Amino acid sequence: MTIDEIKKKTQQIVANKKSLPGALLPILHDIQHEFGHIPEQALSIIGQSLNQTEAEIFGVISFYAHFRMQQTGRHVIEICRGEACQSMGSKSLEQAAQSQLDIKYNQISKDNNFTLEPVYCLGNCACAPSVKVAETVYGRMDSEKFARLTDKLSTYKINVGEIV
């Protein structure tokens, strides 16, 4: 997508939402949904329309862990690093995941399928260690289950919740 296309689509999104009370968050959600992240070019367009500085908008983006300013792989895999998951082996799961995908956290795999992100609680402590893909949390994850999960995500176009 070209910069001009990004700007045009961003302008459309902003125009559709700017009259809402508290319009910034719905605008950011729509932009991220459209592009998979919030492009840097969007900040000035949003700022001009909402009479806010780019710094103010960036402050909101950086406050919420949900928002991203970098492109991600097709599937974002969140690996829990909370205390319960750590006590049940998430450190070795992290190492296996990074080795298998040949990436570190917040990088994109060579096939553009995966991005790994650390999170600090998925609320699935009784089934630790856990990972999350889209809206589905997988518990009692180990390196073998992780390999099956990523294989199925790479190979098939299926609903995430049907895996593992």
Image (spheres, rainbow, N blue to C red):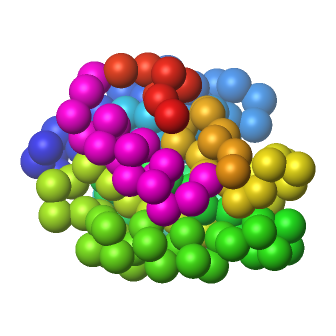
Residue placed furthest toward the left: 2
Query: Nearest the camera: 18 or 96?
Result: 96
In the depicted structure, whether residue 157 falls above or below residue 106: above
Residue 97 seen from this side: yes
Q: Position of residue 64 (x, y in %)?
A: 69, 58
Q: With 134 as the anchor, is 87 left or right in this view?
A: right
Please state the total of marks drawn on the protein image: 0
Residue 144 in which image quadrant? bottom left
Q: Residue at x 32, y 68 (%)?
A: 100
Q: Position of residue 106 (x, y in %)?
A: 43, 70
Quadrant location, the N terminus: top left
Q: Residue at x 21, y 34 (%)?
A: 155
In the depicted structure, whether residue 72 falls above or below residue 94: above
Q: Which residues are magenta?
A: 141-157
Q: Position of residue 154 (x, y in %)?
A: 25, 40
Q: With 52 as the anchor, is 143 left or right in this view?
A: left
Query: Nearest the camera: 57 or 35?
Result: 35
Q: Residue at x 30, y 66 (%)?
A: 101
In the depicted structure, whether residue 18 falls above or below residue 80: above
| Majority secondary structure of magenta residues | helix
Q: Residue at x 61, y 53 (%)?
A: 141
Q: Is residue 1 magenta?
A: no
